[in-house]
Amino acid sequence: MKQHTLKESFSLKGKGLHTGLDIEIKFNPAPENHGYKIKRIDLPEQPVIDALAENVKSTNRGTVLSKNGVNVSTVEHALAALYAYEIDNCLIEVNAPEFPILDGSAIVYVNEIERVGLKEQNAERDYYIVKNKLEVKDEETGAHIMVLPDNDFGVNVHIAFSDSSFLDNQYATLNHLKDFKKEIAASRTFVFVREITPLLQNGLIKGGDLDNAIVIYERQISQEALDQLADTMGVVHKNASQLGYIMNKPLAFSNEPARHKLLDILGDIALIGKPVLGQILATCPGHKINNKFARIIRKDIKLNDVQAPVYNPNLPPVMDIKRIKELLPHRYPFLLVEKIIELGPNHIVGIKNVSVNEPFFQGHFPDEPVMPGVLLVEAIAQTAGLFVLNMVKEPHEYSTYFLKIDNVKFRQKVVPGDTLFFRVRLMTEIRRGMAEVKGYCFVGDKIVCEAELLAQVVKNK
């Protein structure tokens, strides 16, 4: 899939949940590989904060991003909408230290995204592919998030408040992002009456009201205390003996709180910086554990600048050895790519199985056979050659030649029995027969070699 941004900008106005300020926010198209960035246009130098998990400063009643002392909070509902609509690049301008709460859900953002539409970009989407089960636990709260490998993305949420007769157990599921608007987007944030006074004492929810939150009154307090709280919040008084939900609009779903927790998860994992392929199972999630989960994945992304390709041997190859021999002039013992399993507009993935019978093992450490590093670079180059020659009409009339090899690294030895995966991508557009590529060689999930190559395609026959 390709990356996407907005077709055009849209703006919204509303008050801040915690600051109570009147806020204006604008969502703008952004270039490829830009990601989500937030600009504080109310400050003199208009600083920009990258919307990434490592920039989360606080998770108290919302997600707070911070960079160089500049904060912006309550970003999760907007980011959930961008993530659900598979928007990769967006510049968000806001004139306050938080996003407007609007109606407490993501539906207003969704409606505006659908109104302006999406624009497809040239760059490919870079997914974080879950290959092994990953778990995060909070022993103190009992919160737990697990993600399992899958070819698609989905979220299952279970929330439980054992001391509440209204939220004992609730479940919510999102099987496909295309169902976000119908199933999740309209779910509003919620708060318990018993939490309101401490939040107010901490300087929060100054903009909270019954239009932007579900208030859950599940423990009876005195009429005087409830009246005093209603006066503070500027809402109509309620009979203290009548427990239940307090809000100006009825529940959008019977399990709206659980669905809102799912919405928050989407907003917080948007801070990973890449779309995720995997199934998320969450129990009693909150912004704290959501961010812990996102940070673990961010750490993995930093340690591994590119993920190993996913290989399903049951699928037919994109190019078999016959097609490879039609494109490349190489033959035994120097044909080092046996199969192409993936071919995109800007990348290609090839495979070689390393056998103990390879001729170079006779002389390259025969008592401790190690594949020569130069042949790993050659195999990367052959994979790149297949990408380029596959695009010309008469490939047998062309050859590709090295012009430059840069930034070569060998991280691990390759031995008999290893299966090599070569992932090569274009670094720039092909111009005048010149192709600049970055190639990686993997064994399993580990990079064993990488190199940047410049090659020229020449018609010489």
Image: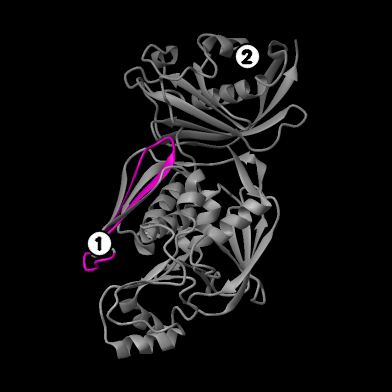
Q: Quadrant of the C terminus?
A: top right
Q: Is residue 30 visible?
A: no
The stretch of residues the image draws in magenta is 143-166
Apparent side of residue 148 relative to residue 359 in the rendered image (left or right) = left
Residue, x 68% and y 21% (percent of image)? 391
User: Which quadrant of the view contains residue 447?
Assistant: top left
Q: Name the residue beneath numbered marker 1.
A: 168
User: Which quadrant of the view contains residue 456?
Assistant: top right
How busy is the neighbourhood of tag 2: few (under 14 within 10 Å), some, or many (20 plus)?
A: many
View extreme (right): residue: 432
On the image, the x and y values in percent for residue 300 come to 41, 48
In terms of depth relative to the viewer, which is nearer, 249 or 351? 249
> In the image, is residue 85 above or below residue 328?
below
Q: Name the residue beneath numbered marker 2.
A: 327
| Nearest-to-viewer mark from 1 and 2 | 1
Mark 1 → mark 2, Cα distance in angstroms: 64 Å
Figure disc tally = 2
In terms of depth relative to the viewer, which is nearer, 327 or 46? 46
